Amino acid sequence: MNKFEKAFGSKVLQWRIPIIIFSLVFVVLAASGSSLLTFTTNYRVYFSEDNPQLKAFDALENTYSKNDNVMLVIAPKSGNIFTNDGLSLIEELTQEAWQTPYSTRVDSISNFQHTEAVEDDLIVRDLVQNAANLAPSDINHIREVTLAEPLLVNRLVSEKGHVSAINITVQLPGLEEAAETPEVVTYIRKLVAKTLSKHPDNDIYVTGIVMMNNAFAESSKSDMQSLIPISLVLMLAILALMVGGFHGTLSTLLVIALSIISALGIGARLGLPLTPASVTAPTIILTVAIANCVHILSTFLLQLQLGESKKQALAESLRINLQPVFLACFTTALGFLALNASEVPPFRDLGNFVAIGVLIAFVLSVTFLPALMSLLPARTPHSDRQRSRYMVRLGEFVIRFRRRLMWGITALMVLLILAIPRNELNDVFVHYFDTSISFRSDSDFTTNNLTGIYAIDYSIESGEPGGISNPEFQREVAAFEAWYKQQPEVLHINSYTDIMTRLNKNMHGDQPQWYRLPENRELAAQYLLLYEMSLPYGLDLNNQINLDKSATRFIVSLKTLSTNEILDLEQRVQSWLAANTRHIQNAKGTGTVMMFAHIGKRNIISMLFGTSIVLVLISVFLMLAFRSVKIGLISLAPNLLPAAAGFGLWGLFYGEVGLSLSVVISMTLGIVVDDTVHFLSKYLRARREQGMSSEDAVRYAFKSVGHALLTTTIILVCGFLVLAISSFRLNSDMGLLTAIVISIALAVDFLLLPPVLMKFEEKKHAQMDSSRAMSDRLSG
């Protein structure tokens, strides 16, 4: 390896012009794939095609109808929706909402299909008509009917009548997601703005699945436009401050830019889309690319201070850093490739984008960077004794107190690891968005004042065609509804039995005592047929009843719940169904909320498997690279402890691990190995090439690479802390915990790894001294 390292630096400088030209040509070809880059924001992208919860949800939507929606929540400042102005606003908005692109249905109290008996006829009509001219008595009647209707209260109108909603069902073609969702959102926002200008005494809040998808997109674009520039400026400033040199900073900037655009272009050609989770890839590639350049430039400047020429300094820097930079990049790429074990496709895409970028950054760092630097002016920097002095002092401190540090840091790590069980696997997917995002604030208002955007869907099967008219089946569904309403998490239930109860009353002259389910199957079927024939286009029951009328849709609207609360509720549901029903054949909860509730746990299990494999590969790789099983085993401690301690610290202060944090171990595993590799590389070089004792080798490692490790850690931590300010929690939590783990990794590499090395090599050193003494006596 030594011969190759020496020859490599010389060849790079010898072929510097062709290397620069070839690098630029390669980047142009790679970046050309960026035209194929797609951006998807649909929440379904977080679930793989074989995800069982997604399959169940698709089956439900194929049986009934899609439930992607936009909900407009109207809140009059007067606190009363039942006024001429309030009802006129709802009536007007309901009509306008039908013009929403891709809309298939609009529901509100205005067009609610109110039924009543007139002699022997069943009259079905819109509940609100010509609202502007309604008399007070008419408005009071509408209020009474509305607040007595279980299908409306806590779904389309609040119990107090202070807010009301218009629900727009949207069925996107799915041919061009990047354009379809914004098209809907643009229309809705214009509609809201126009409506508020005519009705200024009202507030309108907008939520729903379509708005959630749009929030994913807007959060991602905001991160791309703000976080990447902030990261770049901040880290280049740190680089210029701690390493110095305008031309070195400029060259590093080029390596960063070329690495990022190449990774995005190649990823696009491989069919990888950009998503709210993978959009952070450029920031991560940026941090790793800078770390590579720091090590090469630091050694280059150090060699210039020692009096070597520019070419000699570059060649020596490549000789010293080629192996550790390669090991660092390779292990980092392995760590991110472990994300391919994730159950969440966007995390797989993130891992692949970053792995590609890291490997390209390595190649450019050891070829393009030194080739370019050899052509640019380079001034010999002034000797920075202070920088060298504090690292020497740190090394002496570690050597002097090595036993105390070894046991003290070990004890601290054990205590933090013991705090890991304080973490609870939990998530609230609405809280993925910061309160500064309008979707989050509008959704919170909706949940607090009207209904929840969390919903569990059930397709309740009777087991026979036409079985939903079976009185025994209907009674069980009604009992299920009654039990569900008693659960504290529930805000509203949309059940077909409420329609049948109202129809039975209507068909008996609207007499209150007949407000119950029909007792005869044939009558129930006739009522249903008569009602369906009276419904206008777009407001039929296809969204609640399947074609052969063997099953019905049962929708439960919930408060904003965590994944654990949702899974606990569903377990209670299934226990009740098993104990109390005979005619309900199948009723499994599904929907967006159930999908997100299950994905976190599934992802943790898959990532533990993937991370374990990568850990074994990295350990074996380091043993081979360092030509020492013992050193490879020693390296496990500083590679594993930071992530474990980081999760322990997270448990002490936060205590909740969601979807985003389930990938942090794999992400950080490769990154934290970097510091260990560079420290061990310098330590072993001192031991093997210069024959230093273990203590002197530690001093050499601190002096030669300590400042570079501190610089790269500061750069990496700053880069991930920039992600922590994201308004998208999947990115902010991931950035914060990763920054914590990287910080702990440096502390472990500085304060624990050297004492462990000296402890395990003391015996070997003593044996070598004893052998030398024996040899001297024999020769004497």
Image: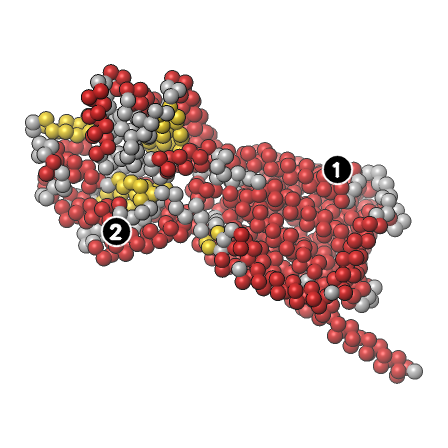
Is 158 positioned to the left or the right of 474 in the image?
A: right
Tell me, yes or no, if residue 581 can be seen here: yes
First in residue order: circle 2 vs circle 1: 1
How many numbered markers are drawn? 2
Read off the residue under disc 1: 250
CA neighbours of label 1 inside 10 A, class few (<14), some (14 to 19), many (20+): some
Tell me, yes or no, if residue 595 can be seen here: no
Read off the residue under disc 2: 586
In the figure, 339 relative to 727: above or below? below
In the figure, 109 relative to 290: above or below? above
Task: Please identify the residue farthest to the top as the structure is shown.
Answer: 133
**Quarter of the N terminus within the rendering:** bottom right
* Proximity of marks 2 and 1: CB atoms separated by less than 8 Å: no
CA neighbours of label 2 inside 10 A, class few (<14), some (14 to 19), many (20+): some
- Judged from the image, the secondary structure of the residue bearing numbered disc 1 is helix
Q: Amino acid at mark 1?
A: Leu
Q: Nearer the viewer, residue 107 or 358?
A: 107
Residue depicted at 33% across the width and 30% down the height: 163
Residue depicted at 31% across the width and 23% down the height: 86
Is 317 positioned to the left or the right of 256 in the image?
A: right
Q: Position of residue 661 (x, y in %)?
A: 52, 50
Q: Position of residue 303 (x, y in %)?
A: 84, 50
**Quarter of the C terminus within the rendering:** bottom right
Q: Amino acid at mark 2?
A: Asn
Task: Please identify the residue farthest to the left as the structure is shown.
Answer: 119
Q: Quadrant of residue 285?
A: top right
Q: Which labelled disc corresponds to residue 486? A: none
- Marks 2 and 1 sit apart, C-alpha to C-alpha, by 65 Å
Q: Position of residue 122 (x, y in %)?
A: 12, 29
Residue depicted at 10% across the width and 44% down the height: 519
